Amino acid sequence: MKVAVVGATGLVGTKMLQVLAERSFPVTELIPVASERSVGKEVEFKGKKYKIVSMTDAIAAKPAVAIFSAGGSTSLEWAPKFAEAGITVIDNSSAWRMDPTKKLVVPEVNADALGKDDKIIANPNCSTIQMVVALNPLHKKYNIKRVVVSTYQSVTGTGKKAVDQLFGERAKAEKGSQEEYPMAYKYPIDLNVIPQIDVFLDNGYTKEEMKMVNETKKIMRDDNIRVTATTVRIPVMGGHSESVNVEFAEDFKLEEVRELLSSAPGVIVVDEPGTQQYPMPMDAHDRDEVFVGRLRRDDTQPNTLNLWVVSDNLRKGAATNAVQIAEYLTSKNLL
């Protein structure tokens, strides 16, 4: 199968190539695409070198699927052109997520919504993906009424510039380095916490927070779920963490919750407080699963659960989820 990866040289695009190789996706020909200034350069995939091509050349090559990770404006301009050529687009930007004509998909939750006519498919926000993977089996059993989520998000979610800022600050503090480094954030990120991800909106929430609110309802196909979010950037690598407080319509037993999560696709339960076992970003790094722990009842109100959710934002939060969508389409002969 011919597969195009648009944004192949970026942080997520590079991870896309890694995940495609690791999961043995049936790529017969890779078509890496990047900005005009990168055309002609090479990327490596499964031991072979492939030259980066332009958008126009990628469309002319007629891949079966194009996985986009090149930003919203690029997706808005080019995804329809790929789709018009009969190419299925899986887009990692926010461009199409809330478009009512486009499916927003986390395979463990709502892949069954996909059909042959879906030529532009949206990949959700990283922080939303890991949360709904954990919540979906619980929603099916107990019916979620309300979610309160606070996130602790890795600098990798911002991109290479943020990673360079973090390590530049650390080198300056620890070794007295005088090397210049970029500022991805308005403030220092090392030894700091920034309670803002994306721009502020008129309601006082950030765009990232409202993504979690709106995307959760769309993916879980339930507009009655109330979601409120606070998203925070912290100086870690490896993945995003989330403190999630969930109110259900029905009561639950903790042991049953553990059983539901343990048997849910894509979920690993790490919940042994007696031996201080719980999910951490360093454990989720370069893993595809969503890790869940710190399971406990909220004693301040009925039918309410606290849990801690961790996942690698570049993998399950981006690249892996997109590849899993492609895998589903392939398995159902929808490409």
Image (cartoon, rainbow, N blue to C red):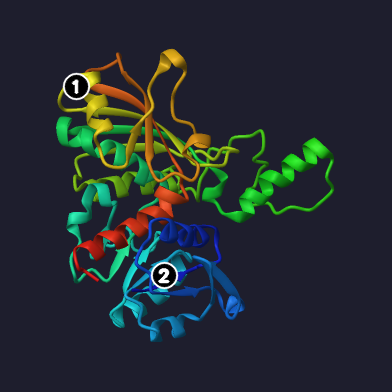
Q: Residues within 10 Å of mark 2 (few under 14, many from 20)?
A: many
Left or right: where 200 falls relative to 272:
right
Looking at the picture, which amino acid does disc 2 mark? Ser
Q: Is residue 127 visible?
A: yes
**On residue 75, which mark appears?**
2
Q: Is residue 100 visible?
A: no
Looking at the picture, which amino acid does disc 1 mark? Phe
Image vertical order of residue 299 relative to residue 121, above or below = above
Residue 166 x/y as whole percent: 67, 44
Q: Residue at (64%, 40%) from the top-left corner?
A: 189
Discs 2/1, front: 1
Between 88 and 263, the one nearer to me in the picture:
263
Callout 1: helix, strand or loop? loop
Residue 127 x/y as whole percent: 41, 44
Q: Residues within 10 Å of mark 1 (few under 14, many from 20)?
A: some
The residue wearing badge 1 is 252
Q: Residue at (30%, 64%) from the top-left corner?
A: 121
Q: Quadrant of the N terminus?
A: bottom left
Q: Quadrant of the C terminus?
A: bottom left
Residue 14 x/y as whole percent: 52, 61
Looking at the image, tell me whether mark 2 or mark 1 is earlier in sequence order.
2
Q: Residue furthest front?
A: 47
Left or right: where 161 falls relative to 296:
right
